[in-house]
Image (spheres, grey):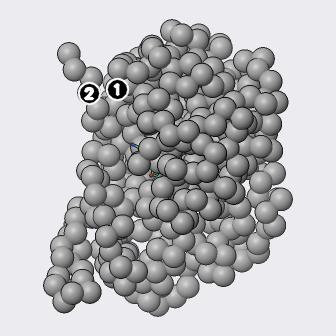
Amino acid sequence: MSENLNPFAIAQAQLDEAAAVLQLDPDMHAFLREPMREFHFTIPVKMDDGSTKTFQGFRVQYNDARGPAKGGIRFHPDETIDTVRALAAWMTWKTAVSDIPLGGGKGGIICNPRTMSPGELERLSRGYMRNIARYIGITQDVPAPDVNTHPQIMAWMLDEYEKLMGWHEPGVITGKPLPLGGSQGRTPATALGGLFTIREAAKARGLSLDGATCAIQGYGNVGSHAHQLAGQFGLNVVAVSDEFGAIYNPHGLDHKVVTDHLRRHGKVVDCPETEAINNAELLELNVDILIPAAIENQLTSQNAARIKAKIVAELANGPTTPEADNILNDKGVYIIPDFLCNAGGVIVSYFEMVQNGYQFYWDEAMVNERLDQKITTAFHAVHTMSQSKKVDTRVSAYLVAVDRVAEAVRLRGWV
Ligand code: NAD
């Protein structure tokens, strides 16, 4: 049978596996397999050339038993409702495993932001917010940035929401620019959180990170910050990639040189003092740590047997298919599963909501220290569960998270 790459089918299959280990009540299992609510809508946008283009938008509130739904908004030409559903499910497990009082949601627009002007993007962002404004809020659902969306887009959306409501409510959206109530440390938080989990996984594996080699797939917000911060953890990043190709230098890549090159040329390939390799080769390099930080379904049954890394740190969402998971686990690779590894972003988003609520802001050192505490605690809950139940780390992350969400659902009397 061919490998099923539908992300929502994968998310459901992962839940099914955890439900079997947990011996989850079948009614609870059926409830947790589906999103609680979703919104599909069209967004007509006046384009610069005078035409009107209609875009398709989605917002999925997967589960809000533990608190308001929380999750980013993606702008992507290949966005599908099933991708958004899967990501909303993973957000539910992510907020639960991180033990923050939020549920899970996700949003998306089918669009190619690279071909749009700033004015068109602003009108699209405001149009998206007009569609969802009445269904979101600090007590209902709090969006954030994700693939191809950034603080400026959050600022436009916040402004549109506040105009519609007639009051200030900065906590309605996170990942805002600092002058509008953003948090210090939010932009690098996903990467930094992932590096904290790599530090803990290396300790668990008895692996020293001092000079350990690392390859990073994807050089956007997450991948680039992971490269920038990796040195603080002793890691030597020898290869990075973007959608156009990959670069390699066995002695290490300098973050500033790569980002300067990317800024000038729009891609990492041809960066000075690097060898060009392709994206498939990057994944199979002989490195200690592999960080997928791009898109879904990158480690599959086709390449998993050739992965040489000792630790796979899933900063991207859904980079590993279930078939690849089995192959990597059999090889003894330590997988830090996506919704644990990349929880740093939502943890600091939660800190941003807390600061907005108090109207009192923390410095970056305090944000990072609290992030370290939260994600390290989450890592050890998952690692300990994995050892005690003798299951792989992804299943154990599900056990911790699903148990917490199911308990909230039960206490509310929904199932
Ligand atoms: P981004 O859009 O800033 O960057 C994505 C990067 O991946 C770009 O460099 C792009 O060129 C590259 N890429 C795309 N297709 C590729 C391919 N086939 N091979 C190699 N590189 C490819 O996105 P981001 O915010 O850095 O997010 C990356 C991943 O991390 C996504 O899976 C996202 O869902 C996840 N994530 C992001 C955050 C966050 O805070 N930004 C939080 C949690 C999870």
Give the camera-side residue of 39 and 239: 239
CA gap, disc 1 and disc 2: 10 Å
Q: Are marks 1 and 2 in contact (CB under 8 Å)?
A: yes
- The image's mark for residue 13 is 1
Give the camera-side residue of 213 and 201: 213
Residue 98 rendering spot, x and y as whole percentages: 63, 42
Give the camera-side residue of 307 and 30: 307
Give the camera-side residue of 16 and 316: 316
Taking 211 as reference, is 260 left or right? left
- The image's mark for residue 4 is 2
Residue 365 rendering spot, x and y as whole percentages: 83, 59
Taking 187 as reference, is 410 left or right? left
**Looking at the image, which residue is at 49% across and 62% down?**
265
**Looking at the image, which residue is at 55% across and 39% down?**
275
Label 2 is placed on what type of residue?
Asn
Q: Can residue 75 be seen here?
A: yes
Which secondary structure lies at badge 2? loop
Q: Can residue 195 be seen here?
A: no
Work out whether mark 1 precedes mark 2 in sequence or the reverse, and give the earlier one. Answer: 2
Kindly indicate the quadrant of the structure image that contains residue 157. bottom left
Vertical placement of 33 versus 305: above or below? Answer: below
